[in-house]
Protein backbone atom coordinates (compact mmCIF):
# COMPACT_ATOMS: atom_id res chain seq x y z
CA UNK A 1 0.00 0.00 0.00
CA UNK A 2 1.20 3.48 -0.81
CA UNK A 3 0.03 6.90 0.28
CA UNK A 4 -0.94 9.51 -2.31
CA UNK A 5 1.18 12.65 -2.56
CA UNK A 6 -1.60 14.60 -0.86
CA UNK A 7 -1.55 12.29 2.19
CA UNK A 8 2.22 12.71 2.44
CA UNK A 9 1.58 16.42 3.13
CA UNK A 10 -0.55 15.45 6.15
CA UNK A 11 2.08 12.98 7.35
CA UNK A 12 4.68 15.75 7.27
CA UNK A 13 2.36 18.18 9.06
CA UNK A 14 2.17 20.57 6.11
CA UNK A 15 -1.62 20.17 5.99
CA UNK A 16 -4.24 19.46 8.67
CA UNK A 17 -7.80 18.17 8.79
CA UNK A 18 -9.81 16.90 11.75
CA UNK A 19 -11.24 13.84 9.96
CA UNK A 20 -8.89 12.77 7.18
CA UNK A 21 -10.29 10.06 4.86
CA UNK A 22 -7.52 7.89 3.42
CA UNK A 23 -8.01 5.67 0.39
CA UNK A 24 -4.98 3.47 0.04
CA UNK A 25 -3.44 2.72 -3.34
CA UNK A 26 -3.31 -1.08 -3.43
CA UNK A 27 -0.81 -3.00 -5.54
CA UNK A 28 -1.08 -6.63 -6.61
CA UNK A 29 1.29 -7.48 -3.75
CA UNK A 30 -1.24 -6.18 -1.21
CA UNK A 31 -3.62 -8.99 -2.14
CA UNK A 32 -1.05 -11.67 -1.28
CA UNK A 33 -1.90 -13.03 2.18
CA UNK A 34 1.31 -13.85 4.07
CA UNK A 35 2.48 -14.21 7.63
CA UNK A 36 4.74 -11.58 9.11
CA UNK A 37 7.52 -14.19 9.39
CA UNK A 38 7.23 -15.26 5.77
CA UNK A 39 7.18 -11.65 4.58
CA UNK A 40 10.24 -10.70 6.63
CA UNK A 41 12.07 -13.78 5.36
CA UNK A 42 11.23 -12.84 1.76
CA UNK A 43 12.66 -9.36 2.32
CA UNK A 44 15.77 -10.70 4.10
CA UNK A 45 16.54 -13.36 1.47
CA UNK A 46 20.23 -13.12 0.56
CA UNK A 47 20.69 -9.89 2.56
CA UNK A 48 22.89 -8.93 5.49
CA UNK A 49 20.56 -7.87 8.26
CA UNK A 50 20.54 -6.83 11.90
CA UNK A 51 17.59 -8.26 13.83
CA UNK A 52 16.72 -6.06 16.80
CA UNK A 53 14.87 -7.87 19.60
CA UNK A 54 15.96 -11.34 18.51
CA UNK A 55 15.22 -13.07 21.85
CA UNK A 56 11.46 -12.50 21.46
CA UNK A 57 10.53 -11.65 25.07
CA UNK A 58 12.11 -14.54 27.03
CA UNK A 59 13.57 -18.05 26.88
CA UNK A 60 10.22 -19.80 27.30
CA UNK A 61 8.80 -17.86 24.36
CA UNK A 62 11.77 -18.94 22.22
CA UNK A 63 11.28 -22.61 23.20
CA UNK A 64 7.55 -22.46 22.51
CA UNK A 65 7.95 -20.82 19.11
CA UNK A 66 10.79 -23.13 18.07
CA UNK A 67 8.55 -26.16 18.65
CA UNK A 68 5.99 -24.62 16.30
CA UNK A 69 8.68 -23.48 13.81
CA UNK A 70 7.61 -19.88 14.42
CA UNK A 71 10.73 -18.42 16.04
CA UNK A 72 11.55 -15.47 13.79
CA UNK A 73 15.30 -15.25 14.39
CA UNK A 74 15.82 -18.91 13.55
CA UNK A 75 13.88 -18.48 10.31
CA UNK A 76 15.76 -15.32 9.36
CA UNK A 77 19.11 -17.06 9.84
CA UNK A 78 18.02 -19.66 7.29
CA UNK A 79 17.36 -17.15 4.51
CA UNK A 80 19.61 -14.11 5.08
CA UNK A 81 23.23 -14.24 3.95
CA UNK A 82 24.01 -12.96 7.45
CA UNK A 83 21.64 -12.24 10.31
CA UNK A 84 23.08 -10.74 13.48
CA UNK A 85 20.68 -10.78 16.43
CA UNK A 86 20.70 -8.04 19.05
CA UNK A 87 18.81 -7.88 22.33
CA UNK A 88 19.23 -6.40 25.80
CA UNK A 89 18.06 -9.66 27.45
CA UNK A 90 21.37 -11.11 28.64
CA UNK A 91 19.93 -14.45 29.79
CA UNK A 92 18.12 -14.93 26.49
CA UNK A 93 21.21 -14.13 24.42
CA UNK A 94 23.25 -16.63 26.43
CA UNK A 95 20.56 -19.27 25.86
CA UNK A 96 20.36 -18.87 22.09
CA UNK A 97 24.16 -18.80 21.84
CA UNK A 98 25.05 -21.67 24.18
CA UNK A 99 22.01 -23.93 23.87
CA UNK A 100 20.82 -23.24 20.33
CA UNK A 101 24.12 -22.41 18.61
CA UNK A 102 23.18 -18.98 17.26
CA UNK A 103 26.56 -17.37 17.92
CA UNK A 104 26.12 -14.37 15.61
CA UNK A 105 24.29 -12.47 18.35
CA UNK A 106 25.10 -9.82 20.93
CA UNK A 107 23.62 -8.49 24.14
CA UNK A 108 23.89 -4.75 23.57
CA UNK A 109 22.15 -1.41 23.61
CA UNK A 110 22.12 -0.48 19.93
CA UNK A 111 22.97 3.14 20.78
CA UNK A 112 26.18 2.14 22.57
CA UNK A 113 29.62 2.85 21.14
CA UNK A 114 30.34 -0.87 21.43
CA UNK A 115 27.51 -1.74 19.04
CA UNK A 116 28.44 1.10 16.67
CA UNK A 117 31.99 -0.30 16.48
CA UNK A 118 30.63 -3.77 15.73
CA UNK A 119 28.35 -2.41 13.00
CA UNK A 120 31.26 -0.67 11.27
CA UNK A 121 33.12 -3.97 10.79
CA UNK A 122 30.76 -5.14 8.02
CA UNK A 123 28.33 -3.74 5.48
CA UNK A 124 24.61 -4.24 6.09
CA UNK A 125 21.45 -4.09 3.99
CA UNK A 126 18.56 -3.86 6.45
CA UNK A 127 17.80 -3.15 10.08
CA UNK A 128 14.81 -5.24 11.14
CA UNK A 129 12.71 -3.93 14.04
CA UNK A 130 9.85 -6.46 14.32
CA UNK A 131 7.35 -6.28 17.18
CA UNK A 132 9.45 -3.76 19.11
CA UNK A 133 8.03 -0.29 18.51
CA UNK A 134 4.78 -0.93 20.40
CA UNK A 135 6.87 -1.56 23.55
CA UNK A 136 8.70 1.79 23.31
CA UNK A 137 7.37 4.78 25.25
CA UNK A 138 8.53 7.31 22.65
CA UNK A 139 8.65 5.47 19.32
CA UNK A 140 9.39 8.48 17.09
CA UNK A 141 12.27 9.56 19.32
CA UNK A 142 13.60 5.99 19.27
CA UNK A 143 13.50 5.83 15.46
CA UNK A 144 14.99 9.32 15.18
CA UNK A 145 18.01 8.21 17.23
CA UNK A 146 18.42 5.19 14.97
CA UNK A 147 18.17 7.33 11.85
CA UNK A 148 20.62 9.93 13.15
CA UNK A 149 23.18 7.37 14.32
CA UNK A 150 22.83 4.67 11.66
CA UNK A 151 21.08 6.26 8.69
CA UNK A 152 24.08 5.55 6.46
CA UNK A 153 24.55 1.99 7.75
CA UNK A 154 21.37 0.48 6.24
CA UNK A 155 19.57 0.94 2.94
CA UNK A 156 16.23 0.19 4.62
CA UNK A 157 14.69 -0.04 8.08
CA UNK A 158 11.88 -2.59 8.27
CA UNK A 159 9.36 -2.29 11.12
CA UNK A 160 6.41 -4.44 12.13
CA UNK A 161 3.72 -3.55 14.67
CA UNK A 162 0.23 -4.84 15.62
CA UNK A 163 -2.70 -3.39 13.69
CA UNK A 164 -5.20 -1.53 15.87
CA UNK A 165 -7.99 -1.83 13.25
CA UNK A 166 -7.65 -5.56 12.66
CA UNK A 167 -10.66 -7.84 12.34
CA UNK A 168 -9.60 -9.58 15.57
CA UNK A 169 -9.76 -6.30 17.51
CA UNK A 170 -13.14 -5.48 15.99
CA UNK A 171 -14.51 -8.87 17.12
CA UNK A 172 -13.23 -8.38 20.67
CA UNK A 173 -14.58 -4.81 20.81
CA UNK A 174 -18.07 -6.09 19.92
CA UNK A 175 -17.84 -8.22 23.08
CA UNK A 176 -16.75 -5.22 25.16
CA UNK A 177 -13.17 -6.50 25.33
CA UNK A 178 -9.64 -5.48 24.44
CA UNK A 179 -7.07 -8.28 24.19
CA UNK A 180 -3.50 -6.97 24.26
CA UNK A 181 0.04 -7.84 25.31
CA UNK A 182 0.27 -6.16 28.72
CA UNK A 183 3.71 -4.74 27.87
CA UNK A 184 2.44 -2.80 24.85
CA UNK A 185 2.22 0.99 25.02
CA UNK A 186 0.48 1.51 21.65
CA UNK A 187 -1.76 0.19 18.93
CA UNK A 188 -0.91 1.41 15.43
CA UNK A 189 -2.77 1.88 12.17
CA UNK A 190 -1.11 2.22 8.76
CA UNK A 191 -1.42 6.02 8.99
CA UNK A 192 -0.21 6.41 12.59
CA UNK A 193 2.76 4.10 11.95
CA UNK A 194 3.65 6.15 8.88
CA UNK A 195 3.23 9.35 10.94
CA UNK A 196 5.58 7.93 13.60
CA UNK A 197 8.17 7.10 10.93
CA UNK A 198 7.92 10.49 9.21
CA UNK A 199 8.11 12.35 12.54
CA UNK A 200 11.38 10.49 13.13
CA UNK A 201 12.86 12.05 9.99
CA UNK A 202 12.51 8.92 7.86
CA UNK A 203 10.64 8.23 4.63
CA UNK A 204 7.89 5.66 4.18
CA UNK A 205 8.65 3.58 1.11
CA UNK A 206 5.82 1.08 1.46
CA UNK A 207 3.25 -0.31 3.89
CA UNK A 208 2.27 -3.99 3.79
CA UNK A 209 -0.32 -5.82 5.86
CA UNK A 210 0.34 -9.36 7.06
CA UNK A 211 -0.77 -12.13 9.41
CA UNK A 212 0.64 -12.51 12.91
CA UNK A 213 1.01 -16.23 13.49
CA UNK A 214 0.33 -19.00 10.99
CA UNK A 215 -2.03 -19.37 8.05
CA UNK A 216 -3.81 -22.71 7.88
CA UNK A 217 -3.88 -24.26 4.41
CA UNK A 218 -7.46 -25.36 5.14
CA UNK A 219 -8.84 -21.86 5.86
CA UNK A 220 -9.98 -21.16 2.27
CA UNK A 221 -12.65 -18.58 3.11
CA UNK A 222 -10.49 -16.75 5.64
CA UNK A 223 -7.63 -16.48 3.14
CA UNK A 224 -10.00 -15.19 0.47
CA UNK A 225 -11.42 -12.63 2.93
CA UNK A 226 -8.01 -11.27 3.94
CA UNK A 227 -6.79 -11.14 0.36
CA UNK A 228 -9.73 -8.90 -0.42
CA UNK A 229 -9.50 -6.78 2.76
CA UNK A 230 -5.81 -6.38 3.64
CA UNK A 231 -6.48 -3.53 6.10
CA UNK A 232 -8.14 -6.01 8.46
CA UNK A 233 -5.05 -8.21 8.87
CA UNK A 234 -3.49 -8.07 12.31
CA UNK A 235 0.07 -6.88 11.56
CA UNK A 236 1.50 -3.87 9.74
CA UNK A 237 4.91 -3.86 8.06
CA UNK A 238 6.59 -0.60 7.08
CA UNK A 239 9.65 -0.28 4.85
CA UNK A 240 11.41 2.99 5.68
CA UNK A 241 14.47 4.79 4.37
CA UNK A 242 16.47 7.75 5.57
CA UNK A 243 15.23 11.14 4.36
CA UNK A 244 18.29 11.46 2.07
CA UNK A 245 17.90 7.99 0.51
CA UNK A 246 14.19 8.52 -0.07
CA UNK A 247 14.62 11.94 -1.64
Image: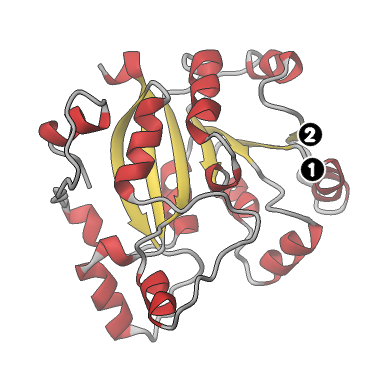
Residue 32 shows in this picture: no
Q: Residue at x 56, y 14 (%)?
A: 149
Mark 1 Cα-neighbour bin, 10 Å: few <14, some 14–19, many ≥20: some
The structure's colour scheme is secondary structure
Q: Which residue is mark 2?
A: 107
- Quick one: 78 or 187, which is closer to the camera? 187
Residue 15 percent coordinates (x, y): 17, 28
3D distance between C-alphas at marks 1 and 2: 7 Å
Q: Locate residue 237, reporting x and y percent.
A: 39, 48
Q: In the image, what residue occupies the spot 71% across and 20% down?
A: 115
Q: Quadrant of residue 206?
A: top left
Quarter placement of the C terminus: top left
Q: Give the number of marks.
A: 2
Judge the density around disc 2: few (<14), some (14-19), many (≥20) Cα neighbours within 10 Å. some
Could you say whether the residue bearing mark 1 is in a helix, strand or loop? Answer: loop
Q: Earlier in the sequence, mark 1 or mark 2?
A: 1
Q: Residue 189, how many percent across, how many down?
A: 35, 51
22, 128: nearer the viewer? 22
Of residues 196 and 42, the one nearer the viewer is 196
Q: Is residue 172 left or right of residue 120?
A: left
Task: Determine if residue 47 is in view.
Answer: yes
Left or right, 171 with reference to 141:
left
Q: Are marks 1 and 2 in contact (CB under 8 Å)?
A: yes
Relative to 201, residue 45 above or below: below
| Residue matched to label 1 | 89
**Element at label 2:** strand
121 lies left or right of 138: right
Which of the numbered marks, if any, corresponds to residue 32?
Answer: none
Q: Residue at x 45, y 79 (%)?
A: 176
Amino acid sequence: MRFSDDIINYLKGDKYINALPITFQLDEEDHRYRTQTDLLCELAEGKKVIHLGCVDHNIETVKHKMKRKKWLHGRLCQCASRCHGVDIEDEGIRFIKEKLGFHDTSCANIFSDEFASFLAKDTWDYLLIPEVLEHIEEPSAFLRLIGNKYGDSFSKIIITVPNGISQDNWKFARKGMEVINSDHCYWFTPYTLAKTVVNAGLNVEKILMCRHGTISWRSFYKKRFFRKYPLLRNDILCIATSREKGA
